[in-house]
Amino acid sequence: MPHRYLPLVLIFASLTGCLSPFSTRLPEVVGRPAEVERRASQIKDPYPDSRLGPEVGFRPLEFQEQRAEPVNAKDRYYSGFVSRPRVSPTPAPAYPPGAMAPPM
């Protein structure tokens, strides 16, 4: 009986860090309203940046004017606070085995 659930347990264990509400947008059965999509596109510009390569004519008419570079830099800066895990840049000090507090 336990061997029957092993593949399911392995699949769930491998997916624990894959989904994040900040970086993953799951498919929806019903599409979002056009106004919601327009506002989401204003917040995070999903269209290609014409400053990085040749013009491809992919941007919709409403979004022909790209966001300014300072606005993009600010958004990248703030999104780093949301999407990065909260870890210390330096590791915690290692204590000797069996110690409850740091050695003095």
Image (cartoon, grey):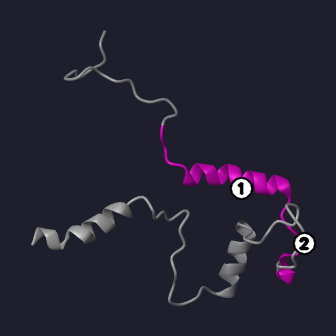
Q: Position of residue 102 (x, y in %)?
A: 31, 18
The quadrant of the rendering that contains the C terminus is top left
Residue annotated with mark 2: 55
What residue lies at 48% left-to-right and 63% top-to-bottom? 20
User: Tag 2, which secondary structure?
Assistant: loop
The quadrant of the rendering that contains the N terminus is bottom left
What residue lies at 77% left-to-right and 72% top-to-bottom? 47
Whole-angstrom CA distance, mark 2 to mark 1, is 23 Å
Does residue 56 lie above or below 31 as drawn? above
Specify the farthest residue to the left. Answer: 1
Q: Position of residue 24 (x, y in %)?
A: 53, 68
* Number of marks: 2
Does residue 101 lie above or below 6 as drawn? above
Residue annotated with mark 1: 75
- What segment carries the magenta color? 60-87
Q: Nearer the viewer, residue 52 or 29?
A: 52
Among numbered discs 2 and 1, the one appearing first in the sequence = 2
Specify the farthest residue to the top. Answer: 104
